[in-house]
Amino acid sequence: MSLLIADNCINCGACLPECPNEAIYENRSASEAKDCKVTEGIGVGDGIYVISFDRCTECVGHFDEPQCAAVCPVDECCIPDSSVPESKEALLEKAKKINPGKEINPAKAWGKVRTGPMAGKFASA
Ligand code: SF4
Ligand code: SF4
């Protein structure tokens, strides 16, 4: 399941350099210019940062928790996108495809996004 950035984003930019999959863009137009899709209705008007569900893996394969949510200073801002359900296996395959030649670690597979509703800022697994 991808994450998405909610309307309460303050455009601080902290999340963008932390993403291991280059899934975060300054706005919807920037993402779509790279042929990276953004969930319908999210980031319309280019007022906030966005996450492309084509590239987000919840950080599976890279880190123990979603890095965008870990650094975001705003509560309930980087949140699960329930319109994009994906299994851990699918996310690992996605991470491999996005990052050819880079080591993808199956042990880095935090499951909270997939297994339950997320409330508030992400805590350690
Ligand atoms: S959860 Fe990870 S892969 Fe997805 S946008 Fe955030 S930092 Fe990038
Ligand atoms: S870290 Fe949070 S508030 Fe800052 S740009 Fe990213 S989503 Fe928006």
Image (cartoon, grey):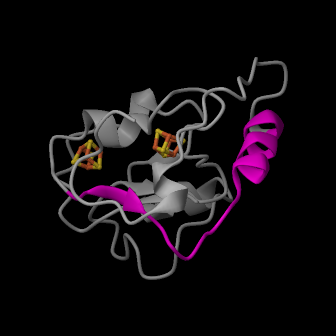
In this rendering, would 105 be left or right of 108? Answer: right
Q: Position of residue 105 (x, y in %)?
A: 71, 23
Please name whichever residue, 108 or 27, is drawn nearer the observer in this view of the structure. Answer: 108
Identity of the residue drawn at 33% across and 75% down: 45
- Over which residues does the magenta segment extend? 76-97
Residue 14 shows in this picture: no
Residue occupying the point 37% across, 69% down = 43
Quick check: is 85 in the magenta stretch? yes
Q: Quadrant of the N terminus?
A: bottom right
Q: Is residue 30 above or below residue 110?
A: below
In the rendered picture of this protein, how many numbered marks are placed on residues? 0
105 within the magenta span: no
Among the 4 quarters of the image, the one containing residue 68: top left
Horizontally, is 54 left or right of 43 in the view? right
Instruction: Assign the C terminus to one quadrant of the image.
Output: top left
Question: Is residue 25 left or right of 1 when viewed as pictured?
Answer: left
Query: In the image, what residue occupies the spot 50% across and 73% down?
Result: 82
Closest to the observer, 32 or 40: 40
Image spot of residue 52 (x, y percent): 56, 57
Is residue 111 at all visible to an observer of this figure? yes
Residue in the picture at 60% in, 58% down: 33
Residue 119 lies, with reference to residue 60, above or below; the image says below
* Location of residue 37 in the rendering, given as x and y in whole percent from the top left corner: 62, 65
> In terms of image quadrants, where is residue 67?
top left
Residue furthest out toward the bottom: 41
Report the front residue among 82 and 22: 82
Q: Position of residue 121 (x, y in %)?
A: 23, 48
Closest to the observer: 27 or 88? 88
